[in-house]
Image (cartoon, helix red, strand yellow):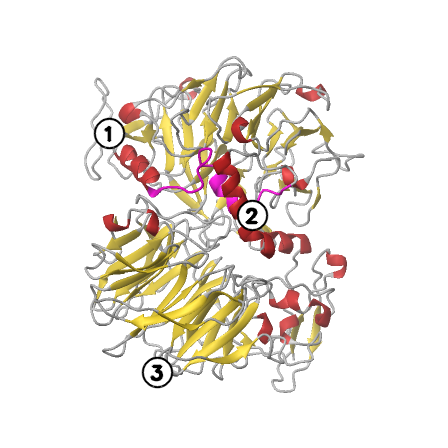
């Protein structure tokens, strides 16, 4: 007997736990009382919404958006802001539809010329690591050595971010490299026991694929840019190379161009370590000189370009196999691996083929597999097998012909596909073959095949029948069958033989996981599926189990975050890992998820920390009164359409009164009963007329609750980038007209607003839009409540680079101290913005979404929530008036 994890989704409301004994005749065992994971339906839907906008609209939405930008047309408010465009909308100048790596390269080069400052030590540091800083004239205090005074990571190190690349050293398998799609390259020398970041200060840390040279494992290549059309994908900057085992990296100059914005896959020829192939959005490229130069050997005409490559490595005349296309008719091609002219021949292109993944069987490389999604539904189209090196293919299993329900769910959310059979409600086809789609063959048996979608599956008969090998909705840390959702890679131990060594790794949206027995039983669910079937949560004892390897692997992608009032606890909203919370006492590897789905903005009641606010995407704000155990909707009274709200919708507390809270789509909304229990009537009231654009930033003056500022994000075309304000915020109505101005004359995205602690008319605005010929500057200041604005970017070597700026923090004890979070890390100023320095002491070249201050043990800290490198903190300067004997003054 074993426990039954029963997920009841009555009325699509909550997942109700129940532990029932179910007899499995084939494997009698003592009954277990494993607890069931409680998960809300709303959270699950929010998690999957990011990856599954309506399939029929996705490509058309992108084209429409691009055309609108080119022609200067505003996006109608009745059209939801798709996640696909949110990242670009924050950064692109008007009319521009793609980002250039050169934009970031110039910014990095500028930053490298800037002085380095340590907020903790309150002093400038030398450029060379290991050099000794010079003391200020007349300062008797000896300077601290470089390496001290750095930003400290606080996690999460146990909730990994999306990972699409993982390598294992062929002769020293305890050495591993993993890469986050926005978190750079990480290295472990103890088999995943701990991880150390590498290449944090490179031009781009959005790593999507990696390979190493098996002849010289010190040589590694990393392809940047995630080109699978998920909304939060970070654009790349070509291919990076390391020749010292991943300790240091450099961009290959030959890939610093638009052909290598999105490098989906890199493979190496057995014939020569100098010969490489790369699949990108624009085609297939080959290098015959270890990446020094590249030649396009196939120009992609398929939508999305080329998505996967596989290559034979056991013969002198080898084949390269490529899969190109997604969201439209795709195909599989092959060509001879050669340094001469290549001729590509289409070998597989069944009607309806969408994104397709490829695999070569290591033990018999004449055997190949292809798993294809259906481009119109993104569900499984089928699995095909070749036994003659990809020359011809036969269907191992197709969704149209298989009689197994479970087989059809390889690229879908398995439990949602059988909700009705499980007794949970009406089934739903939640498909993701365009996003997570991987097929791999067991190194010791060409008939043992692994497939990854939302969950992992294994076939032991050449792809004809499939059993489930992971369950995303089980309880992490309790259920051994749990593995995070959304699988992108499966890697076997170099010594894997299927007998004495059966170790296998998976990389997914939650980081890296390992199983020590990849040949253990998997869970088949024969038809008819019932409530007792494994797919419904009933797993027999001894089935394949998983262990997380996210031990210091700090690659979580935050959108927003704040510390609690005592700064011993901190939480924030993340991409695909929900709203998560950590504590100083627990350490970096003990964060927990307190709400599922994609997370956005958060807030905590300073007078009662059991009262929390969180959100998923769009208009979805919720409140918890029990510390995050349960939530209730907090949107009543808001009467504008969902399409008016940004993908990540800002909301803000009144710093002087937590009962007052603000949110906005294209209209401002106010509540004065945010902390009331219970709330009475509609929570929110309209507090002004239409702004004509979606709001991207909100700030309330700490010294005057009636002064509120809101910054425009998207939706207004040429009028983007206005800052709106009113001085009668608490009494404003739907008829109140908010005045507005523009920090920059060109259309921009106002990403953050901050108000002086004692002067409500002094306000700062950050701009995440790249500079244009008609407008420059990323940080602006107004001293007259937004009537006029002055750029405080500085200039020259002490000016802020032309990179998107997402947040600004004012030191409340000394307002000449400023910090900004950008796409390439944090910069600080000690003179009110006249001059800036880079704060990369311990920091990474990573998108920094939000900055905030918390006081822990009487010491103030600045917290930085990043999109790809988790959370950092550093001690804030001590106010001169309270220095006393403090050596930091």
Give the answer, above or below, for where 492 lies relative to 73.
below
Q: CA distance from mark 3 to mark 2?
A: 43 Å
Residue 389 pos. (x, y %)? 35, 79
Place of residue 635 in the rendered image (x, y in percent of width and height, measured from the top left): 71, 39
Q: Total marks drawn? A: 3
Q: Residue furthest right?
A: 681
Q: Which mark is residue 204?
A: none
Instruction: Out of 273 and 160, give the one closest to the viewer.
Output: 273
Prevalent SS, magenta region:
loop
Select label 1 or label 3 by which is in front: 3
Q: Residues within 10 Å of mark 3 (few under 14, many from 20)?
A: some
Q: Which numbered disc flags the more N-terminal residue, 3 or 2? A: 2
- Asked if residue 717 can be seen in this view, the reply is yes
* Residue 364: assigned label: 3
If you read the primary sequence from the N terminus, does the residue marked by circle 2 or circle 1 appear first? 2
- Dot 1 and dot 3 residues touching (CB under 8 Å): no
Q: Position of residue 771 (x, y in %)?
A: 39, 29
The residue segment tinted magenta is: 79-101
**Is the residue 636 above or below the residue 599 in the image?**
above
Q: In screen coordinates, is 501 left or right of 43?
A: left
Q: Which residue is mark 1?
A: 143
Crowd band around label 2 with a 10 angstrom C-alpha radius: few (<14), some (14–19), many (20+): some
Query: Distance between the Cα atoms at labels 1 and 3?
Result: 63 Å
Camera sees residue 249? no
**Looking at the rendering, which quadrant does residue 794 occupy?**
top left
Determine which residue is flagged by label 2. 61
| Residue that extends furthest to the top in the rendered view of this protein | 784
Secondary element under disc 3, as helix, strand or loop, is loop
């Amino acid at each position: 007997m074993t426990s039954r994890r029963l997920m009841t989704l009555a009325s699509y409301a909550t997942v109700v736990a129940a532990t029932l004994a179910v007899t499995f005749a084939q494997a009698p065992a003592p009954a277990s009382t494993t607890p069931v994971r409680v998960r809300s339906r709303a959270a699950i839907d929010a998690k999957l919404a990011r990856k599954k906008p309506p399939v029929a609209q996705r490509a058309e939405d992108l084209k429409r958006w691009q055309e609108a930008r080119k022609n200067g047309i505003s996006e109608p408010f009745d059209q939801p802001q798709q996640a696909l465009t949110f990242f670009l909308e924050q950064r692109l100048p008007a009319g521009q539809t793609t980002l250039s790596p050169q934009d970031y390269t110039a910014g990095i080069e500028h930053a490298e010329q800037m002085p380095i400052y340590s907020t903790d030590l309150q002093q400038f540091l030398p450029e060379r690591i290991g050099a000794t800083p010079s003391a200020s004239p007349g300062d008797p205090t000896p300077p601290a050595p470089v390496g001290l005074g750095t930003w400290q990571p606080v996690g999460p190190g146990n909730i990994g971010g999306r990972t699409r690349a993982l390598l294992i050293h062929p002769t020293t398998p305890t050495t591993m490299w993993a890469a986050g799609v926005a978190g750079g390259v990480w290295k472990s020398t103890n088999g995943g026991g701990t991880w150390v970041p590498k290449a944090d200060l490179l031009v781009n840390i959005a790593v999507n694929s990696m390979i190493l040279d098996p002849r010289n494992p010190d040589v590694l290549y990393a392809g940047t840019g995630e080109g699978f059309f998920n909304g939060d994908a970070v654009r790349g900057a070509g291919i990076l190379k390391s020749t010292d085992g991943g300790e240091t990296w450099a961009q290959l100059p030959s890939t610093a161009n638009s052909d290598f914005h999105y490098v989906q896959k890199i493979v190496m020829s057995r014939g020569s370590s100098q010969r490489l192939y790369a699949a990108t959005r624009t085609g297939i490229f080959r290098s015959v000189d270890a990446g020094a130069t590249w030649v396009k050997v196939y120009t992609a005409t398929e939508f999305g370009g080329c998505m996967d490559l596989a290559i034979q490595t056991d013969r002198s005349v080898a084949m390269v196999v490529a899969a190109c296309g997604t969201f439209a008719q795709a195909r599989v091609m092959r060509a001879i691996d050669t340094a001469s002219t290549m001729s590509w021949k289409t070998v597989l292109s069944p009607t309806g083929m969408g994104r397709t993944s490829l695999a070569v069987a290591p033990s018999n490389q004449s055997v190949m597999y292809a798993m294809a999604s259906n481009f119109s539904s993104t569900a499984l189209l089928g699995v095909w097998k070749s036994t003659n090196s990809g020359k011809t293919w036969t269907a191992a299993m197709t969704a149209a012909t298989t009689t197994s329900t479970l087989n059809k769910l390889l690229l879908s959310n398995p439990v949602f596909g059988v909700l009705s059979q499980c007794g949970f409600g009406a089934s739903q086809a939640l498909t993701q073959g365009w996003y997570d789609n991987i097929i791999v063959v067991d190194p010791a048996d060409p008939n043992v095949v692994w497939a990854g979608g939302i969950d992992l599956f294994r076939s032991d008969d050449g792809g004809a029948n499939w059993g489930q090998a992971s369950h995303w909705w089980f309880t992490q840390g309790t259920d051994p069958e749990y593995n995070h959702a959304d699988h992108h890679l499966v890697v076997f131990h170099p010594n894997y033989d299927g007998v004495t060594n059966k170790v296998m790794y998976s990389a997914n949206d939650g980081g890296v996981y390992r199983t020590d027995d990849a040949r253990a039983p998997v869970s088949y669910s024969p038809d008819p599926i019932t409530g007792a079937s494994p797919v419904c949560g009933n797993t027999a004892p001894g089935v394949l189990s998983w262990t997380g390897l996210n031990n210091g692997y700090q690659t979580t992608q935050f959108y927003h975050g704040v510390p609690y009032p005592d700064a011993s606890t901190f939480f924030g909203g993340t991409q695909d890992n929900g709203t998560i919370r950590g504590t100083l006492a627990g350490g970096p590897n003990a964060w927990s998820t307190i709400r599922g789905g994609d997370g956005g903005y958060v807030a905590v009641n300073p007078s009662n920390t059991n009262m929390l606010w969180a959100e998923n995407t769009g208009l979805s704000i919720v409140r918890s009164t029990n510390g995050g155990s349960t939530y209730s909707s907090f949107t009543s009274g808001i009467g504008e359409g969902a399409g008016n709200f940004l993908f990540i919708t800002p909301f803000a507390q009144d710093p002087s009164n937590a009962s007052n809270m603000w949110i906005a789509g294209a209209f401002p909304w106010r509540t004065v009963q945010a902390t009331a229990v219970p709330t009475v009537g509609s929570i929110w009231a309209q507090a002004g007329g239409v702004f004509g654009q979606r709001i991207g930033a909100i700030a309330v003056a700490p010294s005057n609750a009636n002064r509120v500022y809101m910054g425009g994000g998207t939706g207004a075309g040429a009028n983007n980038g206005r800052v709106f304000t009113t001085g009668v915020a608490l009494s404003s109505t739907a008829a109140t007209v908010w005045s507005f101005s523009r920090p920059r004359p060109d259309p921009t995205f106002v990403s953050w607003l901050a108000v002086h602690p004692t002067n409500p008319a002094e306000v700062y605005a950050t701009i995440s839009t790249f500079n244009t010929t008609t407008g420059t500057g990323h940080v602006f200041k107004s001293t007259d409540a937004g009537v006029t604005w002055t750029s405080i970017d500085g200039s020259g070597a002490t000016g802020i680079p032309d990179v998107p700026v997402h947040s600004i923090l004012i030191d409340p004890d000394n307002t000449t101290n400023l910090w900004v979070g950008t796409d390439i890390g944090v910069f600080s100023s000690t003179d009110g913005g006249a001059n800036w320095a880079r704060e990369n002491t311990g920091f990474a070249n990573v998108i920094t979404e939000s900055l905030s201050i918390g006081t822990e043990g009487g010491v103030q800290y600045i917290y930085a929530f990043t999109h790809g490198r988790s959370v950092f903190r550093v001690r804030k300067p001590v106010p001169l008036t309270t220095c006393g004997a403090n050596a930091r003054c």
